[in-house]
Image (tube, helix red, strand yellow):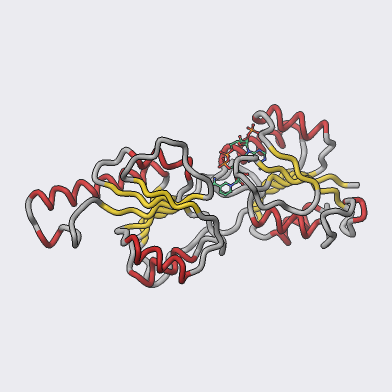
Amino acid sequence: MRRVLILGGTAEARALAAELSGGLPAELPAELSSRGVHVVSSLAGRVSNPRLPVGEVREGGFGGPDGLAAWLAAERIDALVDATHPFAARMTASAAEAAARTGVPLLVLRRPGWREGPGDTWQRVPSLHAAAARLSETATRLSEAAARRSEAAVRPGGGPLRVFLTTGRRSLPVFTGLAGVWLLARSVDPPEPPVPDHVHVLLDRGPYTVDGERALIREHRPDVLVTKDSGGPMTTAKLVAARELGLPVIMVDRPPLPAGVRLVETAAEAAAWAQG
Ligand code: NAP
């Protein structure tokens, strides 16, 4: 039977595992799958209580490209699908290198990125550090304007630049040192302590609703939303609410894919490829 490894941690990876299992309940053996494919899904093991795909699951890093290459050989994997999050760049680079070394065919499954539409006010930046630099410039302009008492340029109510940050708990250190910036930081799991006083942590996990995001923005009155171009429907509500409420967005672009990798955007396309 054809053996497929899915590098997961995303809704697309779970959809692919479900598609390849032919709708079988998780407790039945994969050999009964109508698709003739044995699927193993891999999770990094970082999130507590992760959403699990159907079928066999392994957790934890492989130990870089060498470890993954050895694992692919030991487990006699016929095809590898990298369905990790668009910002999981290390895993994607590792998959490309291990696939090239072992000759195991690799497909990357990535949901499309978000597109700016009418009514949106987005600034695209190439990295988290570029987003932080943009915030720093804005905060400096605000404090200079406040010092000059230029009322027109100072945000109503004064105070620090208020930022709604949804780039993940591990990115928080990139932003916590910025002078004149207050953060509403939302993440699935708590960030590493110590968390400074000017950071308000909100623990939550999508999917989110537009009503909920609107209420959150009204409650915390951010001046700007900083987010990564994750794409997909699970976390798009904040962008809809930001558009409605005139909240500007700093959108961090995705890291580039390794050269030459084959890319699809839907679980159905990946399932067709994985069946050989
Ligand atoms: P990353 O920086 O690219 O990966 C760091 C290391 O974690 C990798 O080198 C690998 O360790 C291990 N790893 C990552 N994904 C793995 C997987 N699916 N199976 C086994 N090991 C994995 O990735 P990340 O940004 O920390 O993301 C970790 C996981 O969370 C990914 O699976 C991703 O799909 C999911 N996720 C990430 C985000 C995000 O914003 N980055 C959002 C939602 C979900 P070794 O080198 O030891 O193999």
From the viewer's perspective, is residue 161 above or below residue 242?
above
From the viewer's perspective, is residue 15 above or below residue 201?
below
- x, y percentage for residue 19? 78, 60
- x, y percentage for residue 79? 78, 44
Q: Residue at x 82, y 55 (%)?
A: 26
Give left or right: position of 39 versus 205: right
Q: Residue at x 31, y 45 (%)?
A: 198
From the viewer's perspective, is residue 158 above or below residue 59?
below
Res 242 quadrant in image: bottom left
Give left or right: position of 225 versus 59: left
Q: How many marks?
A: 0
Give left or right: position of 230 versus 140: right
Give left or right: position of 85 versus 201: right
Q: Nearer the viewer, residue 184 or 165?
A: 184
Residue 124 appears in the picture as rendered: no
Q: Quadrant of ligand 1?
A: top right
Q: Nearer the viewer, residue 38 or 265?
A: 38
Q: Residue at x 44, y 52 (%)?
A: 202
Q: Nearer the viewer, residue 183 or 148?
A: 183
Q: Nearer the viewer, residue 233 or 190?
A: 190
- x, y percentage for residue 36? 89, 54
Residue 143 appears in the picture as rendered: yes
- x, y percentage for residue 110? 61, 54
